[in-house]
Amino acid sequence: MKDYYGREITYLRISVTDRCNLRCVYCMPEEGIVKQPHCDILSLEEIAEIAREAVGLGIRKIRITGGEPLVRKGVLSLCRELASLPGLSELALTTNGTLLAPMAKELKAAGVGRVNISLDTLNPDKYRKITRLGTLGDALSGIRAAMEAGLTPLKINTVLIGGFNDDEIPDLVALTQRYPIELRFIELMPIGHASPFGAEAYLPCGTVLERVPQLQPLEKSGVAELYQLPGGLGSVGLIRPISHLFCGECNRIRLTSDGYLKPCLFSTEEIPLRGLHGEALRERLETAIAHKPAQHGVLTAAEHAGSARDMNQIGG
Ligand code: SAM
Ligand code: SF4
């Protein structure tokens, strides 16, 4: 269905848990989160019910995210159920990849088409530093397993952080020469708990083009501007929520793990869906979609965005 501004809303991102096995410095506090009791988190049945109504209203793509979606018990059966919804054309999942290797084939069999895997560095020490708990080898095993299981085309999400990984831009881009992956640089967003980075950390994605001038532009794909190395098997995506507003093309809504619909990632507006069923649920969803804000305010490194939540609760 369309919102008041004529945007066709076709994409639902579902955070199935706010928990995570890592503690990335831009996403979660070091001590972890105050765990929401299980009863505050949507059950798998509630998630499936909301998804079913949303697909009835024109959602065509669902992405499972988190927190880390692979720590949620029953995620495979949820995927199976969502994949079988008539009218859904794409089921995808975003993960840090560290728990993916033993699950990749099962996820594929459950109906997940492809995965996005987050990877901010190719250096094991830096990987541990940015994730606080993670091991680079586990994430790389997840990437390998995803390719072997056919969870493709594989996208790698890299948050660009000035002074942390901008020196690795050429090496990260070089991966797309050899592998048929889309490596997406995402601008660091000043949201939720994001650790107090200095202004130099908020690098615009245009830096990638300055550091690797041989990148050639391709057509746009969703929110990503695409580029390619000459003769490269893969591509490089730039996602610029800070330096370029793409609200006019935004087709997505988000469901938080505790049952709120967020029509805009950067807004405090949240619509409670819990306890609603059938007609009432459908009407609430319709109203929420119709009232999706025209655009969010300008985001700057100095100011926190409107959302009071951390990314692990919203799903990125
Ligand atoms: N745990 C999974 C993962 O890391 O891929 C899924 C959830 S995570 C919240 C989704 C995406 O949000 C990840 O690619 C992560 O890098 C990104 N993210 C989290 N906090 C961010 C921030 N402050 N700025 C930019 N991206 C962020
Ligand atoms: Fe966990 Fe993903 Fe947040 Fe990192 S970005 S702490 S992996 S939810």
Image: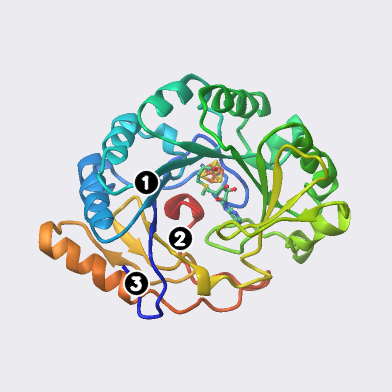
Indicate which disc residue 109 carries: none
Splitting the image into four quadrants, where does ligand 2 fall? top right
SS for tag 1? Answer: loop
Q: Which amino acid type corresponds to the residue marked 3 in the rendered image? A: Lys
Sequence-earlier tag: 1 or 2: 1
- C-alpha span from label 1 to label 2: 30 Å
> Dot 3, crowdedness within 10 Å: few (<14), some or many (≥20)?
some
Q: Position of residue 285 (x, y in %)?
A: 25, 65
Q: Is residue 90 left or right of residue 134?
A: left
Secondary structure beneath label 2: loop
Label 1, residues with CA under 10 Å away: few <14, some 14-19, many ≥20: some
The three-letter amino acid code for the residue at tag 2 is: Arg
Eye-nearest disc, 3 or 2? 3
Closest to the observer, 304 or 5: 5
* Residue shown at 61% from the left, 64% from the top: 190
Give me the C-alpha separation between circle 1 and circle 3.
Answer: 18 Å
Secondary structure under the numbered disc 3 in the rendered image: loop
Residue behind mark 3:
2
**Residue under numbered circle 2:** 309
Q: Is residue 302 above or below residue 186?
A: below
Which residue appears at 52% of the width and 75% of the height?
248
Respond yes or no on whether mark 1 lies under 8 Å from ligand 1: no
Q: Is residue 162 visible?
A: no
In this view, which residue lies farthest toward the top? Answer: 102
Colour setting? rainbow
Looking at the image, do the residues carrying marks 1 and 3 touch, with CB atoms under 8 Å apart? no
Q: Position of residue 304 (x, y in %)?
A: 58, 70
- Per the image, the residue denoted by label 1 is 89
Q: Is residue 147 above or below residue 252?
A: above
Whether residue 43 appears in this view of the structure is yes
Judge by depth and name the residue closer to the eye, 126 or 63: 63
Q: Earlier in the sequence, mark 3 or mark 2?
A: 3
